[in-house]
Amino acid sequence: MKAPARRAKVQPIQRLSIPESIRDSLRERILSGDFAEGEALVQDVLATEYGVSRMPVREALRQLEAMGLVAMRTHRGAVVTTVPTEQVEELFELRALLESDLLARALPRMADQDIAEAGEILDRLETSYRQQDMASWGRLNWAFHRRLYLPAQRTQTLAIVEAVNLQTERFIRVHLVMTEGVEDAERDHRALLDLCALRDAERAVPFLHRHILQAGRTLVAGLRSRRANIRRGISHN
């Protein structure tokens, strides 16, 4: 009798380390606007807030720096990155380019199960809009788009697009609140899902491209206005 094949040893699931837990907390605080652009993140203060030594805080900040959310400055320590509006615009143009390619590759391979699972994620996203659960907006928005792109089987492109989405997430939250753009986002997402359900690449891909670029243009305009108002407020003080 043939001996059963030996299975590889299963590694135990690792819990988040203290630096990773602090990183995730600080990431959410940055994305939610709790920490403003250019604001210093003082290690001693954060260590006291989280009840830890400076070492895990320092490691968490270095991980956030790798994500592009924090910059380490000489004599200033860590500060929340300020992304120029021109770069925000560029990030949305990158999204439009890469995500359109992903969707075009995904549609011929898309199964009904892919559409159903994307629809379930979209239901949760719409619920988070109604509940004003801003902490979930970026995560669920990316989960919805990612589920549509998965059939493309482009792992490296997906990783790049996810990193770009992280850079724009904090601005998207502000944009949706400033412009009351939730209704437009819901309408566009539903329309995109419907086109994907029809496997209509001729309409779905250009629709996605326009959706991302329009969101970027509206966001950049609002961001420029907001930053100008902040500068005027500072200059008047």
Image: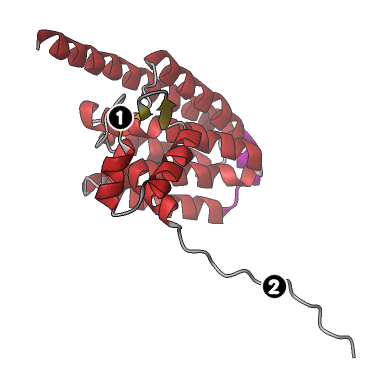
Residue 192 seen by the camera: yes
Residue 31 placement: quadrant? top left
Mark 2 highlights which residue? 9
Which residues are the magenta region? 104-111
Q: Residue at x 61, y 30 (%)?
A: 101
Mark 2 → mark 1, Cα distance in angstroms: 45 Å
Outermost residue to the bottom:
1
Outermost residue to the left:
237
Closer to the camera in the image, 98 or 9:
9
Dot 1 surroundings within 10 Å: few (below 14), some, or many (20 or more)?
A: some
Q: Is residue 180 left or right of residue 37?
A: left
The x, y position of residue 215, in whole percent, is 37, 25
Q: Residue at x 49, y 31 (%)?
A: 164
Callout 1 secondary element:
strand
Residue 177 placement: quadrant? top left
Instruction: Point out which mark residue 223 bears.
Output: none
The x, y position of residue 166, in whole percent, is 44, 36
- What amino acid is at disc 2? Lys
